[in-house]
Image (cartoon, rainbow, N blue to C red):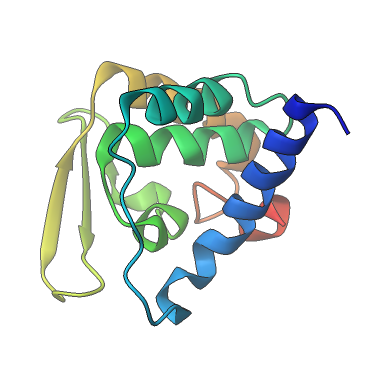
Amino acid sequence: MPINEIKIFYLLNYVRAIKNLHLLQKHLLAITNPKELAGILRMIWSYPYSPIVAGALKMLVYTFQRPGEVRNMKWKDIDWERKEWRFIAYKIKKEHIVPLSRQVMEILEELKPLTGHSPYVFMGNLME
């Protein structure tokens, strides 16, 4: 298997594991090496398969939100005029306001025709 296919295989497994992160008992190490981070970002931005998965991965990068929060993002929680995402944060049970950059708004506009009929921005059955 060529190295790029191996990287994409691991990236796909990472995406599938996002919803199970809360089950892990140990602390997950952060990537602190700039070259490693650059490689991951290149893989995310060149992800060739589902635009929904690609959008979710980019949303994680742009918003720095928990994977579960991004996965459960709802269209009704997006304020298009203020460019904000307002939701009740899972862990703190309080309203959380995330400013949305121009890039995030573009991602959401691209996803609207694909998942706008669902309450969720990132429909689970299309991510699996």
Q: At 61% across and 19% down in the image, what residue appears? A: 46
Left or right of 26? Residue 98 is: left
Between 70 and 36, the one lying in front of the other is 36
Left or right of 62? Residue 49 is: right
Between 28 and 23, the one lying in front of the other is 28
Q: Position of residue 85 (x, y in %)?
A: 24, 44
Residue 53 occupies which quadrant of the picture? top right
Left or right of 118? Residue 67 is: left
Which quarter shows the N terminus?
Answer: top right
Q: At 23% across and 59% down in the image, what residue appears? A: 87
Above or below residue 35? Residue 13 is below
Between 78 and 64, the one lying in front of the other is 64
Q: Position of residue 13 (x, y in %)?
A: 67, 54
Above or below residue 112? Residue 101 is above
Q: At 40% across and 63% down in the image, what residue appears? A: 68
Above or below residue 90? Residue 51 is above
Residue 92 occupies which quadrant of the picture? bottom left
Q: Position of residue 10 (x, y in %)?
A: 67, 46
Q: Residue furthest right?
A: 1
Q: Position of residue 5 (x, y in %)?
A: 79, 31
Residue 111 occupies which quadrant of the picture? top right
Which quarter shows the C terminus?
Answer: bottom right
